[in-house]
Amino acid sequence: MDFGERDYAEREREPLPNALPRPPGELRQLEKVWEVPRGIRFLKVVNNNYIGVFYVGTALLFLVLAGILALLMRTQLAVPENGLLQQAMYNRVFTMHGTVMMFLFAIPVVEAMSVYLLPAMLAARDLPFPRLSAFAFWAYSIGGLIFFSTIFFGVSPDGGWFMYPPLTSYKYSPGISADFWLLGIGFIEISAIAGAIELVVGILRTRPPGMTLDRMPIYAWAMLMIAVMIIFGFPPVIVGTLLLELERAFQWPFFIAEQGGDPLLWQHLFWLFGHPEVYIIFLPAAGMVSMMLPTLAQTPLVGYRWIVLAILGTTALSFGLWAHHMFATGMPHASSAYFSAASMAVSIPTAIQVFAWIVTLYRGSLQFRVSTWFLLGFFFIFVLGGLTGVMVAVIPFDWQVHDTYFVVAHFHYVLIGGMVFPLMAALYYWAPTVSGKPLSERLGRWAFWLMFIGFNLAFFPMHISGLLGMPRRVYTYAGGLGWEWWNLLSTAGAYVLASGFAVVALDLVLHLRIVGKVRVNPWNAGTLEWLPLDNFAARSIPRISSRDPLWDNPSLGDEVEEGRHYLPGTATGQRETLVTSPVEARPEYLMVMPSASWYPILAGAGTALFFLMLTLKQALPAIVLALFTIITVLRWAWSTDRFGTHPPVDIGGGIRLPVSIGGPRSHAWWATIVLILVDATIFACLVFSYFYIWTTNPETPWPPSADPLAPLSWAGAIAVAWILSSVVLQWAGGRVEGTRASSVILTLATLATLLLGTGAVVGSIAAAGHVGIGPGEHAYGAIVYTILAYQVFHLVVLAFMLVFATVRSWAGLLDRARRMPFDSARLLWHYMAIQGLVSVAVIQISPRLL
Amino acid sequence: MSSDPQPRPFARTALYLTGGLLIWAVNFLITYTSAALVCARATVARGAVGMESISTTTLVSCAVALLANAALIWHASSRYRARVRDGNGWRTDDFIDSVAGAVAVLSSVAVVWTSFVAGLPAGC
């Protein structure tokens, strides 16, 4: 690689990387490699421009379904003592409305938009793991539709979208309704984490040459921080749902006060996810606003650095707010006060963004397109929602309005104003990149005004009915309380709002088609997604020297389309994209990407159906589906990492790059690191739960048993086993050479490592059993055995991974250049060993110190 | 502005950019944990420690966090000024330094604001 050897700035002044004319057949070969399958094979498609649109479309379908549930609720509440919905059905409807809106619409649509937009914005051919995106989409869409259909069979959850125990535990919610919620969102968690891996690696490693951190689109900054929030924000809800499901299935009393548990532990875990989630929804919308406004105002974004600062600040502060949802639970005043202060502080970075947008509008010359109207609507509604947010951050005020319709009004102003209006603006703004022409301006304006008027008519009166004392989640109310007119207005507004959505749907049906090849820039935008696009995104990957490259170089589109920039064809005959360094975006190597495949849809369907069978407590089908999914994933993985021995290739401009490198600079290594971060956060939440339970049992000896802890020598032996297992694997890693001898060494090392790991896990379980408290007796036992079960889970998964790497070695597919499966397994094993050591410290050492 | 000197290690750049936020997070964790331990663990009720321990922990943590942020701001501004003085910087460095410094300023505001709690009337 020679890109970094000469002055970088000098390269920016150099002639374009490739000369004309391009070799005959170069473009045709590129088109053929990225071709979309036809007929039934179309289901194999993994191209982001198709998967992204399907993903957005499915999320919008769930928006419609949840919206219909909202209309049912509003119709029920239109007049006092209405009999349209009975109490039990109303509970199901509001639970499904909230759950579908949050888990099946808001989070997925955020990821879906990024699957569609990011590769084009970064001039990459696709996201780095296209099959992973396709898998996430299929798992989500199949699982989501199964989950939604529970409402037709009377088994949908009815405990509210936040599912607080003890109401949702086995005692008060017998049956499988709550299990559908707990296991049903499992596939959303998997999809979200898959998305986070895509986002981190895609944004940091597949930017075009020259797109340094300070030239990255604001939307990419926002999505990068979303990935960070998913990495650290989703694990708490994963742990929460795991603990509640264990309590429901096996009576492990995490949340039962009589047995040492605490229902508030659920609330902490849920809101540790739930509050960052508000920003997981808002920040991408804000990122899209920062992309659209400069174009619509025809001026560069004002305060780029300030907006980056605001995005970083919001990301961090959003993790310090969770307990403001719990002010009314009797938390210590001192604790509440910290969260109140932090909740007010987060308004600062949000305000920075809003002011930057206002100044951009002031400096520019605004074009009044449909997107503009939706953005202006967003400003109005979101700012009102933000102001009521500051009000509910004040503890005494929150006590007054907690669980009233004031809060319902507040979060709809924030979520619909802060997310749905920008999303509508985005649909109208980016639709031309899908179908080559804009949606209807006329229908769009009708949609905007119906939605804007309908929204405010529906939700503004809720502030007043809430202040008048109307509680949330009531299926009806008595007349004469002064709530009648406000509710009637809200219901009328809801129908007006729904008609606005119907107009958008009509516009999409009439005018949106995926055409694959587009060459449009109707708004005169300056960013890369407006380059001429095909199934492979841009023909060649441009060299970037500003934040608005199309404004600074109006001929860039022609240059890219003619193939004058990097990688104008396919260098290996496969799908591929450039991998660049994370800060300076210097080309580092060529990533070979997977083509269309059945594996994503099969694994996605297998995952969704596995969760369904688990929920229905059908053990045998669940095991069969789990095995099916595992085999599919292994077969999928078998086809990866095959190009490490390919000679370096020319990408233009005299740059020769290696193909598919291994080690810490590879995208696979980065993906594994992201996975480890998720894993470590899940484990940290389990450790948090352990100490939380200790905190809430001040009068109980720890451990709460007459029997002593295991002798310290046990802990020492377990620790030695973990360390040795890692050392053996590390040693073996230095001997992966692709020879028969190295395969023998790898096999023996794998056996030794697995034996040592199994010994450490078995020893840990035996040591925990020494105190004589089973998982069903006390919350202490429940959390200790859950931590240990988590180790067992890791051991099983890593056994699969190590055996897989060993088999590849015997098959001649693992050598110095192609060692990704082994390196990933080794990295994960080291992490598991550290996790094992921390487990020993928490379970065996900490009680002696507390 | 001239050439880009050396590739920057990503981990170090990311830590530097988000240093102020990490300082805020550690400060928040310390203050929240101390309040939880003192109040929820009922240490005060059992007479082991007094409520003033929360205020003391908060103030000490706040002071340390502010010092750490001040160091970060000084580091960022001195790097920035040196580049302007020598005229041989690279714009990405300007960006990284200015954002890192601004993040530390925002972090300081958040730390001070949440630490005002220490001055509120004591009580669990």
Image (cartoon, coloured by chain):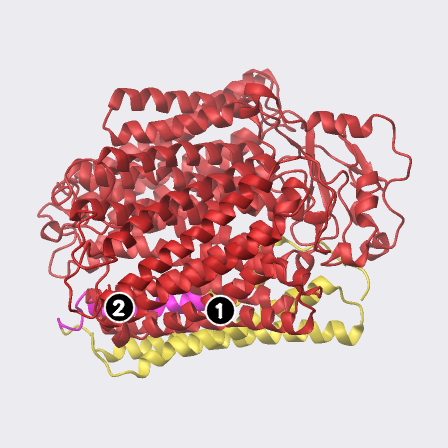
- What residue is disc 1 on? A380
Task: Tell me what residue is drawn at x 59 percent, y 55 percent.
Answer: A219
Letter of the chain in yellow: B
Find the distance from the CA under tag 2 to the CA under tag 1.
21 Å
**Camera sees residue A604:** yes
- Residue A7, image x, y percentages: 83, 54
SS category of the residue bearing label 2: helix
Query: Callout 1: 10 Å neighbours few (<14), some, many (20+)?
Result: some
Res A50 quadrant in image = top right
Q: Nearer the viewer, residue A377 or A49?
A: A377
Task: Tell me which amino acid carries mark 2.
Answer: Ser
User: Which stretch did the figure color magenta?
Assistant: B24-46
SS category of the residue bearing label 1: helix
- Residue A381, image x, y percentages: 45, 66
Q: Chain of mark 2?
A: A
**Camera sees residue A682:** no
Res B78 quadrant in image = bottom right
In the rendered image, which quarter contains the C terminus of chain A?
Answer: bottom left
- What residue is disc 2 on? A465
Letter of the chain in red: A
Of helix, strand and loop, which mostly describes the magenta segment? helix
Query: Callout 2: 10 Å neighbours few (<14), some, many (20+)?
Result: many
Is residue A527 covered in magenta? no
Q: Nearer the viewer, residue B74 or A730?
A: B74
In the rendered image, which quarter contains the N terminus of chain A?
Answer: top right
Do the residues indicated by labels 2 and 1 lie within the same chain of the protein? yes
Q: Nearer the viewer, residue A640 or A102?
A: A102
Task: Tell me which amino acid carries mark 1.
Answer: Phe
Task: Tell me what residue is drawn at x 34 percent, y 32 percent.
Answer: A146
- Residue A498, image x, y percentages: 41, 52
